[in-house]
Amino acid sequence: MKVLTDKQHADLQSRADAYDQIVASIVGAGQDITAADITAETVIKMVQPADTAAEIVDLQPQLDTANARVTELETQLDTANTRISELEADIDNQPAEQTATIAPKAETTVEKVDIIDFAAKNQDDPFAILAKAEKEGLI
């Protein structure tokens, strides 16, 4: 004798399968709960939103501490920026260094001899004049 029709039986079976999937998911999530501990009330509590007011109260001290730290760091940043501006102004107000000059240790007494003076001194040696002109790149 059948108490349920085939359609009722299939409907109850699908609901039981869905519940089994929910239980398996909760147990698989790694919470410290076993399949036997899960009831409809447990599932309802897990699905309902948590009391966010209590969470806000718990997190408020951390938020206050973080805001105080941000304010402190902003003050330090302002102080550092002011100090940088002062240092830049000091650098701008300092006189520049003297330009460096390079001077020989001993005075040179070598006279520059151009090709005309060399030719005048060496009139008797045309090959020396040609060699000097070639050396200076004139030929």
Image: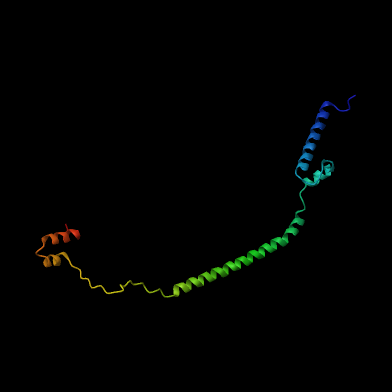
Instruction: Locate residue 104: give its quadrant.
Output: bottom left
The correct choice, above or below, for 58 with respect to 10 in the image is: below
| Residue 117 relative to residue 53: left or right | left
Image x and y of residue 30, in percent = 76, 45
| Residue 82 relative to residue 57: left or right | left
Residue at 14% x, 59% y is: 130
Residue at 80% x, 43% y is: 43
Instruction: Locate residue 126: give its quadrant.
Output: bottom left
The correct choice, above or below, for 41 with respect to 1 in the image is: below
Foreground of the two, 89 or 34: 34
User: According to the image, what is the colour scheme of the structure?
Assistant: rainbow
| Residue 99 relative to residue 34: left or right | left
Image x and y of residue 32, in percent = 80, 47
Foreground of the two, 92 or 97: 97
Residue at 83% x, 29% y is: 9
Residue at 85% x, 26% y is: 5
Residue lying at the far right in this picture: please name it.
1
